[in-house]
Amino acid sequence: MLRYLMRLRSSTVGRIDLRETHRHFSMMVLKPLEFADCVTDSPWFRANLREHELALERSYKSIKLLESQSKELISAGQSKQAEC
């Protein structure tokens, strides 16, 4: 039973790896960007800004993937409905 659950947990659904999705959402906590750090252009601010940029890129990719999978799901549902 444990082997089955581990296999199920690590399996992929469509093109999404469940482990990767969990890891992505567990890293969503970001430090706030402070205007004072922006003005001084501190190295801490640049590193924090880069973290925010990377989070936005990951979110954008996830949204695009969700959009394409939704389109595939809708077209599959429509083709299945046409068969009936």
Image: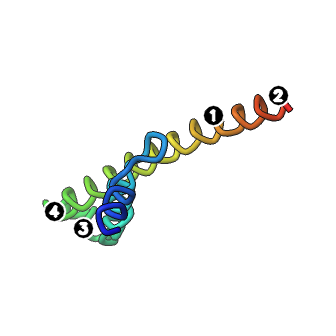
Circle 3: is it few (<14), some (14-19), or many (20+) Cα within 10 Å? some
Q: Position of residue 83 (x, y in %)?
A: 82, 28
Judge from the rendering whether residue 52 lies leftward or rightward of residue 69; answer left or right. left
Q: Which mark is residue 63?
A: none
Task: Name the residue type under label 2.
Answer: Glu
Point out the frontmost of discs 3 and 2.
2
In the displayed structure, 22 sits above or below 77; it is: below
Find numbered disc 1 in the image and state the secondary structure of the residue it sits on.
helix
Which residue does the numbered mark 2 point to in the structure image?
83
Find numbered disc 3 in the image and state the secondary structure of the residue it sits on.
helix
- Identify which residue is drawn at 28% across, 71% down: 36
Q: Which mark is residue 37?
A: 3
Q: Quadrant of residue 9?
A: bottom left
In the displayed structure, 69 sits above or below 26; it is: above
Q: Answer yes or no: do the residues labelled 4 and 1 have beta carbons within 8 Å?
A: no
Alpha carbon of mark 4 to alpha carbon of mark 2: how far? Answer: 62 Å
- Identify which residue is drawn at 76% across, 33% down: 80
Name the foreground residue: 83 vs 76: 83
Point out the frontmost of discs 4 and 1.
1
Alpha carbon of mark 4 to alpha carbon of mark 3: how far? Answer: 6 Å
Which residue does the numbered mark 4 point to in the structure image?
42
Residue 35 in sight from this viewpoint: no
Judge from the rendering whether residue 15 lies leftward or rightward of residue 1; answer left or right. right
Find numbered disc 4 in the image and state the secondary structure of the residue it sits on.
loop
Give the residue furthest to the front: 1
Which residue does the numbered mark 1 point to in the structure image?
72
Task: Name the residue type under label 1.
Answer: Glu
